Image (tube, rainbow, N blue to C red):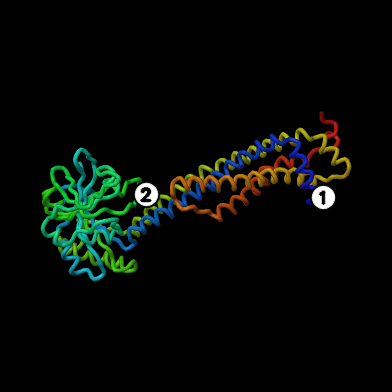
Amino acid sequence: MRLYNLLKIAYAALMRNKTRAMLTMLGIIIGIASVISMVSLGQSSQLSIKEEISSTGTNMIMVMRAFRRPGVNTGSDNVQTLKNTDCTAIAKGAKHVDMLSPMVSTSGQLIRGSNNWPSTIQGVGCDYLAIRKYELESGTNFKEEHVNTYAKVCLIGQTVVENLFGKDENPVGQDIRFGKIPMKVIGVLKEKGQNQMGQDQDDIVIAPYTTVQKRILAIDYLHMITASAVSEDATDAAVAEIESILRAQHRLLPGQDDDFDVRTQAEMLEMMSSVSGFMTILLAAIASISLIVGGIGIMNIMYVTVTERTKEIGLRMSIGAKGRDIMLQFLCESTILSLIGGVIGIILGLIISYVASYLLAWPYVVSHVSVVLSFVVCAATGIFFGWYPAKKAASLDPINALRYE
């Protein structure tokens, strides 16, 4: 039997039961749409994470405090393993480090007149904005003079501006209070929005680290050191230099654990991408269950169809149709059901991915591999789940089939 005739007969058979055919395809449509949208959103998430981390500098290095006991690794506000002298030593001895900034931070209440807002103040060095790629919308950054004199000056983010100042009011030059400490606003940061963890990057106050150390926290140690390598390729060399210098500064013996942690943006990117990739695979695997359900639905309907058309099968066999022709006919019907459902599912999946990416402000990514694979899976599903009912139809005895009521 020619392919054209097979397709024509299959199409006519499906059109006789349009509602049944549509409901049969629904499982395939949902399965394919779910898989494509999950894979697409997973890749969009990974790309969004990569772009965000890259926007803060791919050569950024973070040195954090860590206190280790045998079998224990904890961080604590009371751990005093990083000092101002560590920054000085790194600045002098690390050739592959370009910029460096000490960092201390705390949370508290910001007050201006009758307005108040809970926020975080970060005490940093003059290079911090360049390292983290913050930009000023107005005003100026603080200078070494401010750091050396514990000056009560600060830069504020857009969220702080919105909650402490009016719409048409210029914050630069005005005073705010952090707790009981008055601070003069000398600059306003450009908007950065939320990060991947949902944290508002504009809800921030930046001040000289000595000011936060001495006037607010009354401590002589650092919470973190932020640095940038001279280039992305030099990041590993910079990390090695920092670790060597800090071990010497802290007088750690060979074999003794570090009392600090050095992290890079590359490590963060790899970790976040790994988590996102795992979640994408997990969600796609769960969504693919719908494909199995859809395939079972096709098998079920084809069984019903064979039973309903037993007499028709007997008639075709009596006028010369072979078992192979009958099998191909029903295989063709199940494959068409699966492929049409697959095409609709692919289109629906792409639409869902686009809408979700737009709402989440993620880049829209189309996984061509998942689209092609989905199409192949659709054809395989139609053949696999349609084969047994088709074989049953082909094995019917023509005489018994003609007598079937």
Nearest the camera: 35 or 210?
A: 210
- Residue 203 locus on image (x, y percent): 28, 47
- Residue 132 locus on image (x, y percent): 29, 58
- Of the residues shown, which amino acid type is indicated by label 1? Met
Count of marks placed on residues: 2
- Residue 251 locus on image (x, y percent): 14, 62
Residue at 64%, 43% in the rendered image:
341
> In the picture shown, does residue 232 fall above or below 182?
below
User: Which of the two discs, 1 and 2, labels the residue nearer the N terminus?
Assistant: 1
Q: Residues within 10 Å of mark 2 (few under 14, many from 20)?
A: few
Closer to the observer: label 1 or label 2?
2
User: Residue tagged by mark 2?
Assistant: 196
Residue sitting farthest toward the bottom = 95
- Picture quadrant of residue 56: bottom left
Label 1 and label 2: CA atoms lie apart by: 58 Å
Would residue 156 be found to the left or right of residue 2 on screen?
Answer: left
Residue at 42%, 50% in the rendered image:
276
Q: Which mark is residue 1?
A: 1
Q: Which mark is residue 256?
A: none
> In the picture shown, does residue 394 fall above or below 247?
above
Regarding residue 295, the answer to whether it shows in the image is yes
Residue at 26%, 66% in the rendered image:
240
Residue sitting farthest toward the front = 168
Residue sitting farthest toward the top = 405
Looking at the rendered image, the quarter that the C terminus falls into is: top right
Would residue 79 be found to the left or right of residue 263 on screen?
Answer: left
- Of the residues shown, which amino acid type is indicated by label 2? Gln
- Residue 192 locus on image (x, y percent): 34, 52
- Picture quadrant of residue 107: top left
- Picture quadrant of residue 248: bottom left
Q: Are marks 1 and 2 in contact (CB under 8 Å)?
A: no
